[in-house]
Structures are given as C-alpha cells and as structure tokens.
Amino acid sequence: MHCRFWCFMIRHKTLCFLLFCVALRVSNPISATTIDTSIKTRLAQGEAALASGHLDTAQAILVPLLARIDKGSNAIQHARITLALGRLHFSARRPHEAGAALTDASHRASCNTIDTNSCDTIPGRVGLCVAIADTEARLSLLQGREERAVVGFERALILARCADDPASLAGIGLNRLRFVLKKPDEIFPVIAEIHRILQRMPPNSERLHLSLALGRLAYPWDLALAYRHLTAVIKGDNPRLAAQALETLATVYQTQERPGEALVLVHRALWRLAEDPATFLRLRLEFLQGNLLVALARPAEALPAYRRALSHLESVRADLPINDLDGNSLFQEIIGPLYRNMADLLLRQAAHASEEDAQTLRREAQESLDRFRFAELQDYYKNACAVTRKPFTKPSPGTATLYPVLLSNRIELLLGIGEIIHQASVPIDRPRITRSVHDLALSLRVRNGRIDPYDYDRATELYRWLIRPVTKWLRAADIDTLVYVPDDVLRILPLAALWDGRRFLVKRYRVVTAPGLSLIDSSPRPTGPLRAFLAGLSEPGPVVAKLPDWMVTPFLRGASAPISGAQGVTMRGISLRTTEVGQGNQSRSEHDLSRLKQRLALPGVAKEIAAIAELLPGDRVENETFHLRAVEEAIAQPYRIVHMASHSVFTGDPAQSFILTYDDLLSINRIATLFQPKAFDEVPVELLTLSACQTAEGDDRSPLGLIGVAVQSGARSALGALWPVDDSATQELLTAFYTHLQTPGTNKGLFRERRTLVLFPDRNRHSSRL
C-alpha cells in the first residue's frame, strides 16, 4: 500500500484517511517505464503528503510538477498528476477546481474510450480511471448530486471489475458504504458485497486495512460482521492495525456503557504499540483512556492519561493537518474535546483542593483552554501557521481577566486578579445558556427592517450567571477594567450590555474582549505619534458586481431603500442569516446593480472620515481612491492606526468573509497576508478599526473572522461591530473615541498594555442607556 493509514473512530464514524488511501491505491499499477523517474519520485512525494493530509506540502510539490510537463509528454503521467491535484482540491473543499482537474485527468487518460469487455492494454490506465471515477463520485456527493454520484460509483466498479482488482472493488465499496449510511435499506447489501470481495483476497496487509475499515463502518448495522473483521485484524501480524481495531472495539463498548471492558481493550492496544511510536494513535488511545477513567469515577488516574495525550499532541501538532482528507476538522473531532475535557477535569479537582493546589490546577486549566482557542483559530483558517502564541504578562492593577468556561452541566468562571485565579461554578446546562445568549443577541439586531425591544430579562439572567458570582472579588480588588475571554457561543455576547437590574455593565467596568491570553500582545506599547491610514466607502463602485450571491439575494428580494432602524435611521451593516451564506444564484441586471449601490451606501462615512482626519495625522482614501491596490500599498507603510469605514462581512467560513473596497473584495485571508510582515515590526499597527462590519446571524463561529483579522494583522487593538449599527451614531461614537484617544492620559485606559478585541454593540435606541 502506497500511503499512510490514519484511520480512527469518532462517534462511530471512520474518518476517511483509510478510505481515501484505498482509492489512491488503484492508481498505483502504472509501471516505472510509463513515468519519467524524477517526475515519478516527486509525484510519489506529493501523493504521500496528500495521503497524510498535508495539503500545503502536496500543493507545493504537485503544482510545479504539473508545470514541468510539456504538452507532448506521456498522457498517463499527466493524468495521474492532474488526478492528484483534483484530490487536493477535493480535500481543500474547492469543488469547482476539483471537478475541472478530474475532468482533465479523465480526458487525458481517455477513460471514456476504455472497452470494459476487453479491458485495456495500456499499463495502468484502467487503474487510473478507476481512481478518477471514484473521486468524481465522491465529489458529486460533496456537491449534493447524489444521482450523479451513484452513476460515478457504478462506473468505477465496472472498471475495477474489468481490471480484476479486488482491493479496488473493496475500496470503492467502502466509499459507497459511507454514502448509503444515510439509506438504511441499502446498507446491508453493500456490506455483504464488500465482505464477499474481501473473502477473495489473500490474507495480506492490504486485506487487513480493508477489514479494519469494514469493521468500523459495519457497526452498528451488522455487529456480528463488524466484530468478525475487527477480530481478524486484532489477530493479524500488524500491531498498529491491531491497536486501531482494539481502539474501535473499545469505543463500541464505551457507547454501550461498558467502560470497564473498554478500558481493558485500550490497555491491550497500548501494549500492542510497545515498540511502535505511532504518536497520533497513542494520543487517541490516551484520550479515550482518560474519558473511560472519568466514566469510572477515577479522576486521579484520568488526569495523567489526559496529560500524556496532550504531550503526544504537542509532539505531533506541527505535523498534523487541519482537516482529514474528506474535509472533517481534526480540531472539532479530537483536539478541541481533548483540551476541553482536560480543563473540565482540572477545574473539578480544583474546586475541592487546597488553595495552593487549586491555583496550580486552575493555571493548568487556563493554559489548556488557551491552547484550545489557539487551535480553534487555526481550524477556522484551515492553516496551522495562521496564528502564533505569545507570552502573557500579568494584568496591571485595576484590571481582571474573566474566563468563562461552558461545560455540559455548568459554567466555570475563572477570574484572574494579579497572581491569583479565583473560581466560581454556576450549575446550568449548556443548552439553556445558549438559548439565552441567542435571545439577547437577536434583540440587538435589525430584523426585517425593525429593531425588537431590548431583552432585559435575558440581559439580567446572563449577568446573574456570568458576573454576580465574581462580584465580591471584583469589588475587593477595586477592579475597573474587565478583560473578557469568551468561550464558544459567548463570543456573540456583548458583555458590556448585561443588565444588573439598575444599569448596564459598561457603566461599572471598562470591558474589552480578548480572543485568548496567549493570542494578545501584552508587551509595553511603543510611544510616538499615531499616524493613521483612513479608508471610507460611502458609495460602492464596481465591487457590487463581485459580491457573492448569498449576500446579494436578501437585498434584491427586499425594498430598494436602505435598512432602517428606529425612527427610520439608516443602519450601517447587512442583515445576514446563516442559512443564506453560500447559497443563492441571482442574476444581476444593471437595475439590480444600481439598487445594490443604493442599499450599500453609508452616508455617515464621509463625515466620519473627515472628522477623524482632522484629529489624526496621516493619509486617507475615499470611494474611487479606496481601491484594492491602494489598501495593499497602504498596509505596507508605517501606519499606527488603520481605519476602514466600509462593509465588512464575517461568517463561519473565512472563504466567505471579506471587506468591500470600491472595486473589489478584500478577503480576510488576503488581509492576513498583507499584515503578516507588520506583525513583527518594532512599531506595529496599534489599532485596526472596522466601523461597518457584521457577523452572520445564527453562526456562533462567525466572530472568529473578526477575531482572526485582529490576531493575524498584528494590530495590538481592534475595534469593530458584531451586527448592523446606526450609521450616524457610529460616526459620532468614533469621532468621540479618537478625540479621547488624542487626549493625554487617555491612552492608558484604552490600550491596556495588550492587544484586545473591542466589540461594540452600539445601537441608536440603546446609546442613551450605554
């Protein structure tokens, strides 16, 4: 077998490293005489990187390799490289590029000309076409085109039968099985067919790999057959595969609430790996062992198991892909739960430990949670190098860090004051607090052109859960600034808008929001003038023709007037729903484009930019001069403040998140690239302001886009909105903000020796209260 097998069980589903590798295997029969030796070597390296999930490495190999091949080169060679690129695009969730590459590969290999009655005499061509057809079928599934997927799988099976290749037939069958898991009436025939194919194969390593995959996928549909194949793997001569099979059975026992028996299997699996480093597999086994020990009420033994798992994770973290080859997030499936479970157990133990031991446990829990947030941003950007961790120094006097942790049955509040971390536990289930946060957030948004009444009940309830339990420590230390590090759904919650029954929290504390303590720069702020780059877009230009359909659709189906708030005031922003992101297919006439320009106009921006320009030295661009090239050139200059007054959209997908310039869309990935060199400047950007940004409603991950821009830009502070805001009120607020910024003695309060992300929920109807 030509690839690495990273197969493991998550919630009774086999992640697709094994299945993808099985499909990759069918392209192997191409002989050495068919492919130039040097190209063959590089291709093998690219395929190995792809099979391991290292997409960036694979792309760095395969793209130049394809460019090396001239038009007159061997068609099979060209097709195989193009197939690898198609798989790369598939894994990176780029279906359009994947489809184009696979079509090209099929054309170059002349797959449609193969006579399946007489098969083929060209070395490797049938096997290559099997792989192409199988990948095309899985791409169709990704695109929701099930009928086309069925046709593709059938074509792949016909070609595999033509090649008389049982391993290929079994691999395709396993991919089909993953497809029909949604159709219970079709599952058993597919399982039986794969089983029959495997019975024809010799008892070699390849059969063990395939048996492991079938054993995993057959559960829970055919428990006897699943057990039969997993047992065969355990009895085989491959210790690593045996350990994986034992892991699978242990997971099955865990779901059957048989933790004691599952733990025995984990111990057996670790024993089988005695002479095999298999670090990632050990990580999973130790994580599973920790979970089982917790279920057995043996926390003292569970904690060392979690620590060993984290040690394994740190040793392989740089080599782990962000996603598996089917696009599933390793963070969401393994890495995130490991950090969170570890923190949960540490905090439970800290609640009953001596004060000295409790402080140690709380610091370890906070470190685990900070690593969780670091990994979460990497997962969001699908890039392990997207963010870097930074050392954090203790807060200055008068400042406390509030670290709420959402667990399944409670909220743990970690309050850091000086060297001490206080802990308060609030017994409440996660669904209830999620509902309350969503309700409060909805009451702060414009919906159908209206502003709903402010939800004081939810604001009070959340104050009671998040602030009241730590109030005694805040008062005792005379705290006036809260650095808020929100967890999960709490990211969409404006802490400053919580209501204690008499006033909003912002009346009592300055509230700043940090993405994580290791993601902010807590070094002293350089002194010097605050030279600014100001960019404003009050009237969009050609960019409206480049807006994605999911954003355009809500505008075109509504009235032509701008969004209105209370008393008909113009709202700065776009009402986005999660269900709309990535959807819609509107055609755009000149009339449509004109309406879009009207609806995206920001009348207050011109006054905002003019007022700020009088306060801050620097340069400004507006409308026609606010084009993409101007932004790219400006960011390279030594500006201390970058202020962009234009629509900025952040969703749960960085590929669908951007800022509007006059002529084009500035993607957040491009922003990161532009700002990255400045992150290491001696005088980095001090403040990044996005005064017309908003996140997708109903998507708890969408604030990660705004957080990520702040983190990746290297800016020490960032200011932005989570939803549409009053246009004129925003202009007035920001003018006042920069006026105070220029006032001697104000900077210390606004830039608390660290980079913070300030999310303001300013609303015209709430401004008098806040």
Image (cartoon, rainbow, N blue to C red):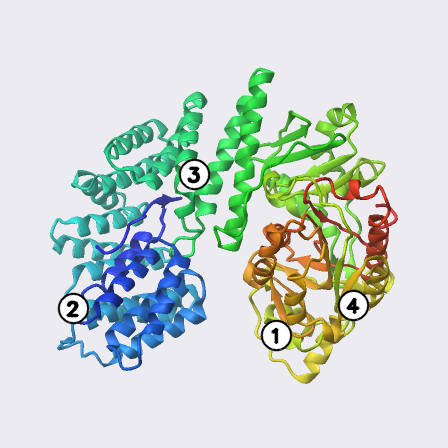
Name the residue rendered at 78%, 72% in the picture.
561
Would you place residue 22 above or below residue 439 in this image? below
Mark 2 is surrounded, within 10 Å at the Cα level, by few (under 14), some (14 to 19) or many (20 or more) other residues, namely many
Residue 455: which numbered mark, if any?
Answer: none
Circle on res. 314: 3
User: How packed is label 3: few (under 14 Cα within 10 Å), some, or many (20 or more)?
Assistant: few
Residue to which mark 1 is pinned: 546
Q: Which mark is residue 163?
A: 2
State how far apart marks 2 and 3 are (Cα).
Answer: 44 Å
The amino acid type of the residue labelled 4 equals: Leu
Q: Earlier in the sequence, mark 2 or mark 4?
A: 2
The answer to whether 719 is drawn above or below residue 481 in the figure is below
Of pointers 4 and 1, the one earlier in the residue sequence: 1
Disc 3, SS: helix
Q: Quadrant of the C terminus?
A: top right
Element marked by disc 2: loop
In this image, 138 relative to 700: left or right? left
According to the picture, the residue beneath numbered tag 4 turns out to be 602
**Image position, residue 147 (x, y; %):** 37, 70
Front one among 320 and 70: 70
State the residue in front, 265 or 690. Answer: 690
| Marks 1/2: CA–CA distance | 47 Å
Few, some or many C-alpha atoms within 10 Å of disc 1 (few <14, some 14-19, many ≥20)? Answer: few
